[in-house]
Image: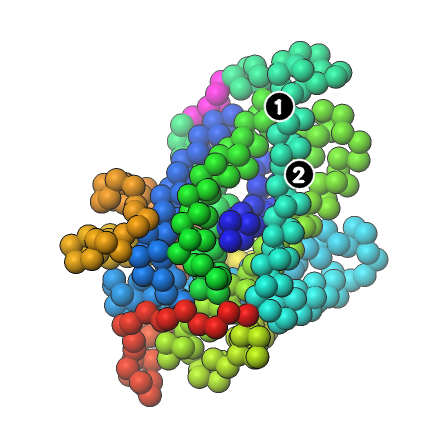
Amino acid sequence: MTMIAVGGSVGAGLFIGSGAVIHAAGPAAVLSYALAGALVLLTLRALGEMVVAQPAAGSFSDYARLALGPRAGFAIGWLYWWLYCVLVAAESVAGAATLAQWVPAPAWLLSLGLLLVMTGANLISVRVFGETESLFSMIKIATIVAFLILGGLFALGLWPGAEGATVDNLWAHGGFAPNGWSAVLAATVIVLFSFGGVEIVTIAAGESDEPETGVARATTNILWRIALFYIASIVVIVTVLPWNDADVTTSPFVSVMETVGVAAAPLIMEIVVFVAVLSVLNAAMYTSSRMLYVLTRQGDAPKALVRVNRRGVPVRAIMLGTVVGYASVLANYLWPDTVFPFLVASIGAILLILFITIVVSQLVLGTRLRREEPERLTLRMWGFPYLTWVTLAGMVAILVAMAFLPDQRMPLAASLGSSAVVLVAYELRRRLGRTPPSDRPLAQGPRG
């Protein structure tokens, strides 16, 4: 489960996207990653408290349902499903772009092939998903550890061939925050979305043998992983290379390895980025299908989707999620400059809305549990309720900041539009549904 948490959050956003953050904030990008990482860590801890105190198959969807009512559970469940359906398409397109460098085939065919392969893996059993994700995660972890060791030695002047320490890159090119502290805060908005995926562990908990123990361990251990994989990697990049080096923006990890003198660095990193894409694609398929399965069991989706095979796999829920992926890939082929960018923009702020919902749910349920059943709180949110309020304030501040950043306005507007559609759908479900909306959490389902 810890590997699943790591696998869901360490992807191309770190290996490639970190370059844009460094370009925006300079060496102070380290602080952007630290701030965003702290907010995500606190959110995950708040979620972990609820999962351990009251395990539920629907995870944060069920906790929103318990704390804020069925409307919140319905809305965040469907928004989360949509988020990962679009990610299935986006990651298949990204994976095809990398694969096209090695395989002489049309991009749409490569995207289709990746979707079919990963769909097949998810249809076998949840164990195959977990083992595949663990393998992908180990490859990424090994790469980052090697990167940190080699890059760290070079930055300190201890690597053979190094002409001396390069740590003065932290301040020698316009200062530590060359673009101002406002740029550091603006970069935090971008960085926050790189951490998306850590919450998948609480969904996978419903199909693990010891959900409470697994979630407690994963939420506790994620702290040093965030520090190691993200913050330490950024420190190495901005110490080895000047932050305004053109190559840092496009391929920071490759540029560092080439500077150190690693042979075939571009090819190695292309392979690792491809593995990272497959990892996120694998996790996106699993997550979208399980959230849809939860919504179906709650009566918020067609009952026909609730059926599982003899291995406990919700086949129909998986297939529906991938159908959206196939349609999105087709849209990318037919209208690459219009439909697909809008679909990706429509999920731009959903992760932030999810984090805010988790924190608000924990404020409500945490207060209730401390008053009525404190013995169930074996894994507690730190500094409750003060740190919970601080986390909520930070998330809301980032949501508001998106409205003032030109590059973030369209994703914010599109995500709010997606939210409005879901809320209208809830009203239709409440008025026309055969059963009233449920305000109760789901028991854990069968394990595949």
Q: Main secondary structure of the magenta part?
A: loop
Residue 90 lies, in percent from the top left, at 60, 58
Q: What amino acid type should be assigned to the residue bearing mark 2?
A: Thr
Sequence-wise, the earlier of marks 2 and 1 is: 2
Whether residue 109 is visible, yes or no, is: yes
Label 1 sits on residue: 152
Closest to the observer, 385 or 169? 385
Residue 76 lies, in percent from the top left, at 37, 64
- Furthest toward the bottom, the residue is 434
Task: Reply yes or no: does residue 179 show up in magenta.
Answer: yes
Going by the image, does 113 lie left or right of 317? right
Residue 416 lies, in percent from the top left, at 38, 60
- Furthest toward the right, the residue is 104
Q: Is residue 340 above or below residue 240?
A: below
Residue at 75% in and 40% down: 268
Q: For residue 143, which numbered disc appears in the image?
A: 2
Closest to the observer, 324 or 321? 321
Residue 59 lies, in percent from the top left, at 39, 62
Q: Which residues are magenta?
A: 173-180
